[in-house]
Structures are given as C-alpha cells and as structure tokens.
Amino acid sequence: MESSRTKVVIIGAGPAGLLLGQLLQKCGIDHVILELRSAEYVLSRVRAGVLEQPTMAALREAGVATRMDREGLPMTGFDLMWEDRRAHINFSLAGKCVMVYGQTRITEDLMQARQATGGITHYETTNVQPHDFDTEQPWVSYEKDGRQFRIDCDFIAGCDGHHGVSHKSVPKDRIKTYDFAFPFGWLAILADVPPVSEQVAWINHPDGFVMCSLRSKTRSRYYFQVPVDEDIKAWDADRFWGEYRRRLPTSLAERLVTGPALEMSFTPLRSTVNTPMRFGRMFLAGDAAHIVPPTGAKGLNMAIADARRLFEGLKQFYHGGGGHMEQLDSYSDDALARVWKAVRFSWWMTNLSHRLSDNPFNRQMQLAELEYISGSVAAQTTIAENFCGLD
Ligand code: FAS
Ligand code: PHB
C-alpha cells in the first residue's frame, strides 16, 4: 500500500468538498480530495439553482464568483400560485436577495479554480474508507488504477453526499439519523427554451406540485410532482410537456415554449439528518450529514454553509496558534442549529405546495394557509427571511 501524508483528507468533490478544498488551498492548508466519480460525471449532474446571500458571500470569499456575478440572475422574490390565485413573496421584506445560478456552474467554477491553484483531486477512486477517526492519527485508504493507497492526516472531511461512505463508517450506536420520506418526488426537465416567468413559481395544483424555474433567459428548469414509485422511463420530453402544460395556471401555460430535453431526472423528496456531524477527527458536511426536499432550495446552500463553517474551524486549528480546537469543537452544534431550521422550512414548503394524500381536508388546510399568506405581510416576511437564508 502506497503511503502519503497531508493535513486534511476531503472525501467527495461535490460543492461541499470543492468549496472546502478551495478555502483550504487559498489558506495554504495541505489537503487532498478523493472523488468516486470522474470529473465529467460530477459535472453532468444537474441539480440546484438558487443561491442564498451567505452562499454568494462564501463563493466570493473563495475567489470563484466572477462568472456568478456576471451571469447569475438576481431574484427579488417568488410567486406562490394556486387555482387562479397568486401571492408574491418579496424578498425586500427580509432585506435580502437571492440569485439564480446553477449548481453545475458552481462546480465548474470550483473545478477550474482548483486546477489553476494546483489542488490535488484524485477522481475515480474506489473503496475509499476512513480509519481511526477517533484517534489523533486518522487515515484514509482507497484504490485507484488497481493500486492501493493510504493517506495519513490530521482530519477527515466527509463531503461524500447521502450515499457516501463517511456517515456509514460511524458505528450505529454513535450516530442518530432522523428520517422522513414523502411518498412522492419531482420529475425534472432542463431545456433551452425561454422561461414562462422571470420569477420562480411554486404552484399548488390539485393533481400535484409544479415549479417553474430557470437558468438564464433562454434556459428553463421545470419540475412537477409524481409518485415516488413512478416509472420514470415512461416519461419522455413530449409527455412531460403535456402534463406540465396541463398543470400550469392559464397565465403561464399560454407562455410555455417547449423543446427537446437537455436532461430529465427524478428526485425523491426526503429529509434526513445525521447527528452529530462530528466523530472525533472526522467531520460531516453537506448531503453526507443532511438532505432536504428541494422545495425550499436549501440543499446546496446548506452544503456551502457547512463547508464554510468547517473551514473556520480548520483555519483556527492550523493558523490560530497552538492547535486551538474551539471552533472545531462547536462545529456540529453550530451547524445543526442552522440545519434544523432549513430542514423545517423545506418540510413546511413541501407540505404547503404538494398533493399530500387523497384526503380533501389536507387541500383545504393548504388553501386556507395560502389565502392567509396572500393577505399577511407577517406571513410573507417569515417566508422571505427563511427562503433567503437565516443569519
Ligand atoms: P454531493 O452529493 O453533491 O457530492 C458528494 C460527492 O461525493 C459526489 O461527487 C459523489 O460522487 C462523491 N462520493 C460519494 N461517495 C463517495 C465515496 N465513497 N468516495 C468518494 N467520493 C464519493 N438542492 C437545492 O438546493 N435545489 C435543488 O433543486 C436540488 N435538486 C437536487 C436534485 C438531485 C437529483 C439531487 C440528488 C440533489 C438536489 N439538490 C438540490 C441537493 C443538492 O444540490 C445537494 O444539496 C448538493 O449537491 C450537496 O452537495 P454535497 O454535500 O457536496 O454532496
Ligand atoms: C431550481 O432552479 O432548480 C430550483 C429552484 C428552487 C427550488 C428548487 C430548485 O426550491
């Protein structure tokens, strides 16, 4: 087994791992990223699109925001729509703004910055396994091109997502996982067609949730609710467009431009939180620690916030003089205080906007809440401050 040593081993090159790597690189803290997939595969994943203000600040601090600031679309609010009704949530109520800029672009920007600064990322690694993270000499083993490797380190950052190895390496009696799976998910399409609306819209339709989002003035990102066991292979772009148009309010359906799919995918709607987010010298960040229904546009923002907060702890340890651990010691509690509020908001937005069951009572409760929101600045302010990201 070929051995080497570094300060931090990051497992996973998604947004959390890449941002943490970029911040460590800028700070001169040695680290290595181990990624299961190829860079091309990581870039092929189409996911989030809405950035909170703290996310924009973290990307600017990491020096990877030039294209975001040039091409990102400022979002000043969003629409809640139901039957022929509409409530606009104006982010000025929270004194904040949000930006539409695809996660794929962020990943690309981080990858390019990493290439320019010489950060080490080993793609297509297999059998990555954290070891001895309860000691002060943790290490990580992995395989690549038929060879076996060992990296000794001070810390391990588990940024390997919901299906990663980090959280699964923790003994069951040391980790408490909270889990709630909705019986539905989102069918998504990405297409080079002009968006039906410049505002992102959440639509409560009696047959299921619909969302209109965008990536630019010429590229649209659309979703609608399907049962979790839906046969996704039975959906092509034409069938998607037919159902999507049927569920849109007339004012938007009239403006719908359809076209070939650049990508179609299915996302189950699920909330999972692994607690704590630290196990000795191993720290979980991003989807490795928590996943949320995309309804609240929180997943990517939570991953960036975790990476930013974990970097603060590592910076204090290496540059604060004397190996201080206070920030690392409080990482899990600080992160979870923020995570649970984002999990709640995502769960609440999902319950407000999706077809929850065949029981008409549920829909009556949703219609009453939507009507209340449309007439209450207090309710709209609550939504605005949660959507834009709590301090
Ligand atoms: P990621 O999952 O992005 O990255 C983890 C990385 O670790 C991956 O590259 C993976 O290949 C790698 N990995 C896994 N196991 C490994 C191992 N054993 N060894 C090495 N590497 C390993 N969020 C929103 O805010 N809005 C949305 O609309 C939205 N849509 C989504 C749609 C889908 C289909 C999915 C899956 C998620 C969506 N999300 C959305 C959430 C998503 O954006 C995540 O929150 C975000 O990617 C989290 O980033 P990371 O924590 O870096 O995890
Ligand atoms: C997106 O643009 O992909 C998007 C926007 C808001 C969400 C989820 C996804 O809540």
Image: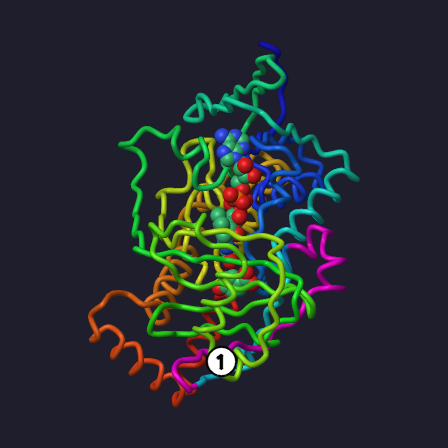
Instruction: State left or right for residue 359 relative to residue 356.
Output: left
Q: Nearer the viewer, residue 72 or 284?
A: 72
Image quadrant for the N terminus? top right
Q: Is mark 1 within 8 Å of ligand 2?
A: no
Q: Is residue 97 above or below residue 49?
A: below
Q: Where is residue 339 drawn, in percent x and y?
A: 42, 55
Q: Quadrant of residue 167?
A: top left
Up-down: is 231 above or below 296? Answer: above
Q: Amino acid at mark 1?
A: Ile
| Residue on which the image places disc 1 | 89
User: Is residue 306 in sight in this rendering?
Assistant: no
Identity of the residue drawn at 32% across and 37% down:
175
- Across and down, in percent, residue 256 comes to 58, 74
Q: Residue at x 36, y 48 (%)?
A: 273
Task: Residue at the far bottom: name it.
Answer: 375
Q: Relative to 104, is 204 on the left or the right?
A: left
The reply, left or right, for residue 165 in relation to residue 175 is: right
Q: Position of residue 223 (x, y in %)?
A: 49, 63
Q: Position of residue 265 (x, y in %)?
A: 50, 51
Q: Is residue 30 visible?
A: yes
User: Which stretch did the figure color magenta?
Assistant: 59-85
Pointer 1 local density, CA inside 10 Å: few below 14, some 14–19, many at least 20: many
- Seen in the picture, residue 118 relative to 192 is either above or below; the reply is above
Residue nearer the viewer, 174 or 163: 163
**Residue 274 lies in magenta, yes or no?**
no
How was this image coloured? rainbow
**Residue appearing at x 52%, y 76% in the figure:** 78
In this view, the residue in front, 314 or 381, is 381
